[in-house]
Amino acid sequence: ITGSSSKLLSKEIATSLRGRSLSFRLFPLSFREFLNFKGFEFKEPLIEAERGKIKRYLEEYVEYGGFPEIVNYSPLLKIRTLQEYLDLIVYKDLVERYGIEKTGAMKGLMRVITRNFARRVSIRKLHGMLSSLGLNLSKTKTYEYFSYLEDVGFVIPVRRFHFSEVESIRSIPKLYVADVGFPTVLGVRDFGYRIENIVALEFLRRKHYQEPRLELYYWMDAKGEVDFVVSLGFEIKELVQVSYNVDDPETKQREVNALLRASNVLKCKNLKVITWDYEGTEAHDGKKIEFMPLWKWLLRL
């Protein structure tokens, strides 16, 4: 079954067909698919010129995202098209489907989420942000509107890892958006959060297309956090930090220390830091930590 999401969401298709269905979520282009759309082909081992071109394309991917239609557009047309996508989500996927009357409040909620993407944000905090903007929406309605945005795939909440599933469900989520082009539309520039969002989307892409048992969480204690806990069933497979710049010794030590603490608590030895361009393997407190550039991780090289 194909067609506009304004007709049936995947869970509604399953209900309509009484379970006799398989639903596949469509994500924006992966970085490898993005390169294919650009007509860029490469073979290993890469020569220096190819590495340079991949990094330049990655900068564009991080800035404007991976919607197929806009890949080869000019920067101005990319922005205008992304703005139209946001309007389409509001009026096609939300207003028509759910009969939302407070479209201003819904637009405000989308803006607030987008401006705070890749951060821990509670419904209470979202409600407070809307109130500060003069948008009167009850906490119950804020939760309801948030659930609609999650249903249509605009916002992707990732919960804190707990050994208790109930505690995990109750935790404050980190909020990722469906495409990093949306923050660009609103003038949000933070590069570090962008690459973290891209990593989250790539993990979810791999879950939907390759390993449906994969689950994604974040971990935190009183001293800091680890961006991603990757589990497979009851087994924790990987702990991943995302850090744009590890050149600063203090930043690097903070990321490493959080990984080591999480490793001790969660009994996981597969530790990774995804960076912009630093690559290497280091030993810290007797544990091996792999540092990998984002482009290599996305392309699985």
Image: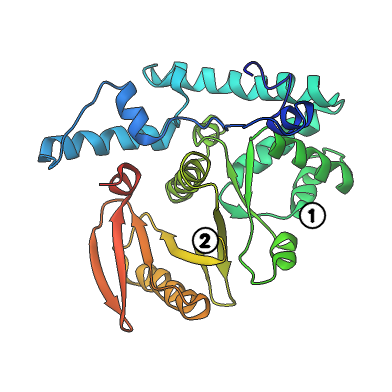
Q: Where residue 112 sits in the image (x, y, percent)?
A: 68, 41
Crowd rating for badge 2 (residues with CA inside 10 Å; few <14, some 14–19, many 20+)? some
Q: Report the front residue among 299 and 255.
A: 299
Kindly identify the residue that appears in the image at 50 percent across and 37 percent down: 180
Q: The N terminus appears in which quarter of the rendering? A: top right
151 sits left or right of 85 in the view? right
Q: Where residue 276 sits in the image (x, y, percent)?
A: 31, 51
| Residue 73 drawn above or below residue 239 | above
Q: Where residue 93 sits in the image (x, y, percent)?
A: 72, 23
72 sits left or right of 16 in the view? left
Q: Secondary structure at mark 2?
A: strand
Mark linked to residue 231:
2
| Residue 129 drawn above or below residue 178 | below
**Which residue is disc 1 drawn over?**
124
Residue reaching furthest to the left: 47
Q: Report the front residue among 227 and 1.
A: 1
